[in-house]
Image: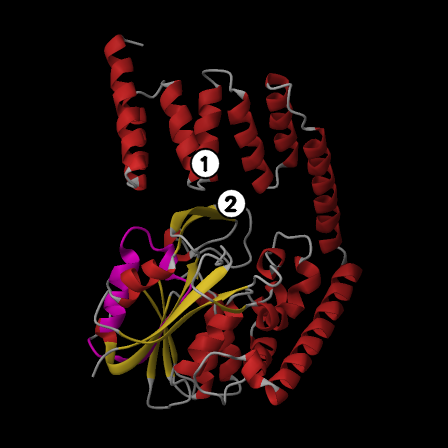
């Protein structure tokens, strides 16, 4: 490599480091990507760019860059460990063990025998789980077990609702709504919920939105931004209101329409519409809706898209209309990317079948601090803050254990609503907030 090119690469790396120290994280990636396109054989740039992708949670891109670098130069122990971690997250345990061994040979003072053994058993149990999933007898037993869990969960929730509703639902709003109503709706109409379970934190979000929006008012027009596969807006339509489900892509619309067809067989008067578009430019007139919701979707819009979406919700709401917003929260603001094995709305840009699994999609995710939640969202327009708060599972961290990839998830799937109501409790906006927290805002557009 020519000396001037080497000096230029070093200056680019210094600029990227300075941008990172000043909090301009996205600029770091752009600088490294542009420099690598001009110097495609630079192993140093590949190492920095691959590590940047790794730290930002963009595992697929990190893998591609590191493997490309490995064709030019032998990787050191640090890169081998990163490759092992990335393959572990993707469930490719054979490749994980290969790179763990490579790291061990280059860094002999560290012992990886326990980790290698753990990787082997993880692959072993995963293979058993896959084989069991194809057994008709075991699938039937799992279905019966799930039904029993659901019945037990609904029964306990009903008892709590009847005798101690204030302990179950500390948030304000319409006290006439009960979670068992939504669970019966999901049981009767939502096959996806029966199979995959309701996301742990979604229970609280649906409760907050349903108890504060005028869902039973037949004169009300409601908007749900970033609906995805969530059928709560269909439940609201069954209660009487006219509901518009809005999303950045149509990837979840096929599922929503199937549920709507089932509902229509019993209730022909349901008023429900699906619209695709950009949340930063909502295709609706001013003052069109009586209420709006955005349930854990604003954090997935990069840069200032969340602010623009809040401004558009303000514009489309009637004076006096309420907006219910929930976001991922933490004690300190943090943003990055996640990889998930399914389509993720506007960031995938495709209409993939809901059942499809396999390729990984990148999804941006921001965790809001209490201050950021107010500054970015509540002050995006002259909103009136009706209520705000946080929920966390500090007593018993169930959210991680109920993730689809966790070993206990199949045994607890039918219990998710009950576990969420019991252990996802109000939390103070202090340093005790964890990455499992969600924050919520109930906002009103001034008259």
Pointer 2 residue: 359
Looking at the image, which is closer to me, 139 or 18?
18
What is the distance, in whole Å, between disc 1 and disc 2 at their CAs?
Answer: 18 Å
Indicate the quadrant where residue 242 lies.
Answer: bottom left
Q: Quadrant of the C terminus?
A: bottom left
- Residue 54 circle label: 1
Residue depth check, mark 1 versus mark 2: number of the one nearer the observer = 1
Residue 279 in view: no
- Residue 235 circle label: none
Secondary element under disc 1, as helix, strand or loop, is helix
Going from the N terminus, do you reach mark 1 or mark 2 first? 1
Say whether residue 150 is left or right of residue 384: right
Magenta stretch in the rendered image: 286-314
- Which residue extends farthest right? 137
Say whether residue 258 is left or right of residue 20: right
- Which residue extends farthest top? 2
Q: x, y (%) of residue 171?
A: 47, 78
Say whether residue 314 is left or right of residue 203: left
Taking the magenta stretch, the answer to whether it contains residue 304 is yes
The image shows residue 48, relative to residue 118, as above or below, that is above
Q: Quadrant of the N terminus?
A: top left
Q: Residue at x 38, y 30 (%)?
A: 49
Check disc 1: other Cα within 10 Å, few if <14, some if 14-19, many if 20+. Answer: many
Indicate the quadrant where residue 197 lies.
Answer: bottom right
Q: Residue at x 61, y 76 (%)?
A: 187
Residue 372 in view: yes
Secondary element under disc 2, as helix, strand or loop, is loop
Q: x, y (%) of residue 281?
A: 23, 63
Say whether residue 421 is left or right of residue 210: right
Q: x, y (%) of residue 138?
A: 78, 60
């Amino acid at each position: 490599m020519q000396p001037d090119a080497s000096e230029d690469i070093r200056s680019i790396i210094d600029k990227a480091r300075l941008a990172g120290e000043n909090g301009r994280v996205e600029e770091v990636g752009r600088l490294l990507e542009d420099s690598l396109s001009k110097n495609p054989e630079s192993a140093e740039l590949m190492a920095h760019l691959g590590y940047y992708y790794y730290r930002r949670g963009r595992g697929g891109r990190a893998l591609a860059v590191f493997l490309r670098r490995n064709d030019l130069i032998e990787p050191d122990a640090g890169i081998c460990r990163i490759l092992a971690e990335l393959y572990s997250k993707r469930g490719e345990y054979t490749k994980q063990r290969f790179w763990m061994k490579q790291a061990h040979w280059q860094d002999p003072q560290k012992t990886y025998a326990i980790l290698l053994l753990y990787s082997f058993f993880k692959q072993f149990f995963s293979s058993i789980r896959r084989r069991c999933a194809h057994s008709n007898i075991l699938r039937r037993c799992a279905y019966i077990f799930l039904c029993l869990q659901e019945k037990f969960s609904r029964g306990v929730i009903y008892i709590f609702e009847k005798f101690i509703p204030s302990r179950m639902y500390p948030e304000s709003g319409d006290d006439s709504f009960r979670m068992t109503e939504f669970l019966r709706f999901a049981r009767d109409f939502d096959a996806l919920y029966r199979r995959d379970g309701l996301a742990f934190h979604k229970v609280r979000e649906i409760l907050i939105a349903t108890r504060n929006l005028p869902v039973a008012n037949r004169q009300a027009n409601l908007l749900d931004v970033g609906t995805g596969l969530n059928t709560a807006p269909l439940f609201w339509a069954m209660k009487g209101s006219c509901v518009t489900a809005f999303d950045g892509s149509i990837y979840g619309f096929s599922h929503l329409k199937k549920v709507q067809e089932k509902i229509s067989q019993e209730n022909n008067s349901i008023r429900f519409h699906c619209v695709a578009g950009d949340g930063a430019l909502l295709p609706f007139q001013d003052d069109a809706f009586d209420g709006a919701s955005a349930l854990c979707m604003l954090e997935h819009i990069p840069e200032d898209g969340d602010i623009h979406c809040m401004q558009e919700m303000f514009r489309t709401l009637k004076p006096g209309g309420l907006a219910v917003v929930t976001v991922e929260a933490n004690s300190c603001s943090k943003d990055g990317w996640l990889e998930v094995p399914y389509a993720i709305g506007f960031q995938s840009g495709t209409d993939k079948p809901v059942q499809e699994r396999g390729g990984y999609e990148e999804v941006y995710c921001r965790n809001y601090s209490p201050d950021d939640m107010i500054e970015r969202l509540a002050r995006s327009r002259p909103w009136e803050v009706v209520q705000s708060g946080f929920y966390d599972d500090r007593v018993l961290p169930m959210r991680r254990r109920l993730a689809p990839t966790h070993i206990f998830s199949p045994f607890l799937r039918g219990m998710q609503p009950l576990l969420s109501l019991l252990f996802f409790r109000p939390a103070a906006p202090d340093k005790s907030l964890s990455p499992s927290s969600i924050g919520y805002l109930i906002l009103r557009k001034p008259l």
